[in-house]
Image (cartoon, rainbow, N blue to C red):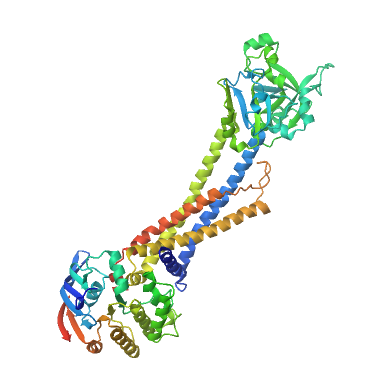
């Protein structure tokens, strides 16, 4: 990562999907600069391009045109292998649902990014256990997805997202599937851990209250940023 | 690092195969795939082992039936003189030989009453070690020596007290002729030259008395062979005249070897002159051996189709897995696995299905072979073959090929699903999960 003050820079990003004979413009020249350690809420109607922007930012998808610069490095030109390694080491993800691999226990799920990176035998499980303890699941290390509630699953996902000490955390409606009480716990945990670890976070949500709790907001409409809010 | 990553992928692949116990369909399909490979490998092992057993049995009979090697004249029918080519001259050249003896051989017609049979008349010296011949192995020395004696037929007319040399008949020949011990048999040589008739005073047709019967349990030998003493056999050689007796003419010298399977090495050691040739047991049975080999490989190739079907089943199962686990694949991509890693994961799953199937197939196959061998629960009708039970021969090299080929097929079966899985767009997969 370079000395650039920005952790995430999107430079005139467009994303066009070809669905049968029809072209769908999901992103229309989106530009966004997010400072290191900033926490940005992305809101907007369904189909406004929030998730697409998040996935393009997280190198899960490639932009049709434009540049994705993360930590000062243009990652939009990376090959699959390089961008996968970058994703593994620098980006953490928390999705709305199906966050966990059902065949693996909670601690194994958290260990997964470390194991993919070829991490040490003792260091990875140790850190995974510490993180699970930090999210309040120290007693549920060996429980599998089916044995965990929705809120607990999201907490495991947060622990896993933080295992590699990422510079960026991308959360796609992490509380969208949870009840109010669980949502509060997960929100609190997510914000607290990101603050503590100095992680730059982009969080997609439909929940305006949650969006307002974050220092910066972006409102998307029709594939572009319609409005900026909060401190930038 | 490489091995650590390998074990990691193996661990993930195994977990994914072992998982979904609640989703019975997928687990069931995985079991079917494993069973398909196992059944294919089992059948291949059992069939090839039994065929190998038959082949070995046949080879043993070939090796016990006729000389492992024969030294012949370049013109086989003419033969050569033992004065020019003494038997002793080959003993130093072949340290591996365990017996050498001269013989004559001629295709003749045997007649008994109204019955005729085309036979191969073998002339041997009963004082020599003739154990290279199947009939000598099943006859006692005394029985063999009966060909040296003169016998009166059991039935004679007009108080005829004529005596004739003895002849030993294969049971098949005796059956064709309707002859038994003590019967008179006339041997005619359609090959003898007209000169022989004029000069030899009746060599073309000679009468013998059946002095014994033999059964080598090889149909080809028992239905074709008749044995007389060496000088009698000589009389049926092409262009016979009495001078051939003085010059000790024979058709060839039969040699038995300590290690007959390495007959080509012994053949190389002999390095004969231009007027002599060597025929090995492999040359004599080339057509049969080739047919056996062809049968074995054809059977192997046909039965391998079962494994091919199993590979298709693996491919189908894994395609189901790819669609079933689309979200998980995309999740793994989001955690940092690249396309090659995903492909490797699915190929490993195919590999594991193959390995498990092959292990079960090997165990079942070898178990069945062991059962056939030890408990002899499959009887062969004794009227069909000389053996009572299915023979089994363990073929480690063939088993290795079966396992290797089955493994390659299962991996090939996993390739297409692996490519499809690796090419999934993680963003799309996660968005529509």
Q: Quadrant of the C terminus of chain B?
A: bottom left
Residue that lies at the very extreme toward the right in this rendered image: B159
From the viewer's perspective, is residue B46 above or below residue B256? below
- Residue sitting at x 44%, y 66%: B7
- Residue sitting at x 48%, y 53%: B404
Q: Quadrant of the N terminus of chain B?
A: bottom left
Quarter-wise, where is residue B69 in the image?
top right
From the viewer's perspective, is residue A211 above or below residue B286? below
Quarter-wise, where is residue B17 in the image?
bottom left
Quarter-wise, where is residue B76 in the image?
top right
Residue that lies at the very extreme toward the top in this rendered image: B198
Q: Nearer the viewer, residue B214 or A217?
A: A217
Q: Is residue A191 left or right of residue A229?
A: right
Q: Is residue A228 left or right of residue B276?
A: left
From the viewer's perspective, is residue B109 above or below residue B427? above
Tell me residue B189's x, y (percent): 65, 18
Tell me residue B331's x, y (percent): 34, 72
Tell me residue B14's x, y (percent): 46, 67
- Residue sitting at x 75%, y 33%: B139
Residue A93 visible (yes or no):
yes
């Amino acid at each position: 990562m370079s000395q650039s003050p920005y952790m995430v820079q999107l430079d005139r990003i467009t994303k066009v999907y070809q669905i049968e004979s029809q072209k769908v413009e999901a992103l229309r020249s989106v530009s966004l600069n997010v400072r290191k350690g900033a926490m940005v809420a992305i809101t907007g109607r369904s189909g406004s391009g929030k998730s697409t922007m998040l996935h393009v930012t997280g190198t899960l998808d490639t932009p049709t045109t434009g540049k994705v610069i993360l930590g000062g490095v243009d990652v939009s030109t990376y090959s699959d292998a390089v961008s996968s390694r970058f994703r593994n080491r620098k980006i953490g993800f928390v999705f709305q649902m199906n966050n966990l691999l059902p065949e693996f226990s909670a601690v194994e799920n958290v260990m997964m990014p470390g194991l993919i990176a070829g991490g040490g035998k003792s260091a990875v499980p140790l850190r995974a256990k510490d993180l699970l303890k930090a999210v309040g699941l120290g007693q549920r290390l060996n429980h599998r997805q089916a044995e965990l509630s929705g809120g607990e699953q999201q907490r495991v996902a947060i622990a896993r997202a933080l295992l590699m000490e990422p510079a960026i955390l991308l959360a796609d409606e992490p509380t969208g599937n949870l009840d109010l009480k669980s949502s509060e716990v997960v929100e609190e945990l997510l914000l607290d851990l990101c603050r503590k670890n100095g992680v730059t976070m982009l969080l997609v949500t439909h929940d305006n209250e949650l969006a307002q709790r974050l220092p910066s907001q972006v409102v998307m409409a029709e594939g572009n940023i319609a409005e900026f809010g909060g401190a930038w | 690092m490489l091995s650590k990553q390998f074990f990691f992928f193996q661990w993930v692949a195994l977990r994914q195969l072992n998982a979904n116990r609640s989703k019975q369909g997928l687990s069931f399909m995985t079991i079917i795939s494993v069973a398909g490979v196992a059944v294919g490998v089992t059948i291949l092992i059992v069939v090839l082992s039994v065929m190998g057993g038959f082949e070995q049995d046949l080879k043993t009979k070939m090796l016990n039936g006729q000389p492992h090697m024969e030294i012949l004249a370049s013109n086989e029918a003419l033969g050569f003189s033992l004065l020019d080519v003494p038997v002793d001259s080959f003993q130093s050249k072949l340290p591996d030989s365990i017996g050498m003896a001269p013989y004559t051989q001629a295709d003749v017609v045997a007649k008994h009453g109204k019955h005729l049979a085309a036979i191969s008349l073998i002339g041997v010296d009963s004082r020599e070690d003739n154990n290279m011949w199947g009939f000598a192995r099943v006859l006692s020395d005394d029985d063999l020596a009966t060909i040296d004696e003169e016998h009166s037929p059991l039935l004679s007319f007009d108080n005829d007290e004529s005596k004739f040399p003895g002849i030993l008949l294969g049971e098949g020949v005796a059956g064709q002729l309707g002859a038994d011990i003590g019967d008179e048999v006339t041997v005619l040589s359609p090959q003898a030259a007209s000169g022989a008739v004029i000069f030899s005073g009746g060599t073309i047709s000679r009468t013998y008395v059946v002095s014994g019967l033999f059964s080598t349990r090889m149909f080809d030998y028992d239905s074709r062979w008749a044995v007389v003493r060496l000088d009698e056999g000589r009389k049926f050689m092409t262009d016979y005249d009495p001078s051939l007796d003085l010059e000790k003419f024979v058709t060839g010298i039969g040699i038995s070897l300590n290690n007959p399977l390495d007959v080509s090495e012994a053949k190389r050691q002999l390095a004969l002159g231009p007027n002599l040739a060597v025929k090995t047991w492999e040359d004599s049975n080339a057509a049969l051996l080739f047919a056996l080999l062809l049968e074995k490989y054809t059977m192997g190739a046909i039965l391998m189709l079962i494994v091919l079907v199993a590979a298709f089943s693996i491919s189908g199962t894994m395609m189901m897995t790819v669609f079933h686990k689309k979200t998980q694949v995309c999740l793994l991509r989001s955690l940092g696995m690249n396309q090659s890693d995903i492909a490797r994961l699915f190929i490993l799953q195919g590999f594991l299905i193959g390995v498990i199937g092959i292990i079960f197939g090997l165990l079942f196959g070898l178990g069945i072979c062991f059962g056939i061998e030890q408990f002899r629960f499959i009887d062969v009708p004794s009227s069909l073959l000389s053996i009572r039970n299915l023979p089994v021969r363990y073929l480690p090299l063939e088993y290795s090929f079966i396992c290797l080929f089955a493994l390659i097929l299962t991996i090939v079966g996993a390739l297409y699903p692996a490519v499809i899985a690796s090419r999934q767009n993680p963003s799309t997969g996660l968005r529509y999960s």
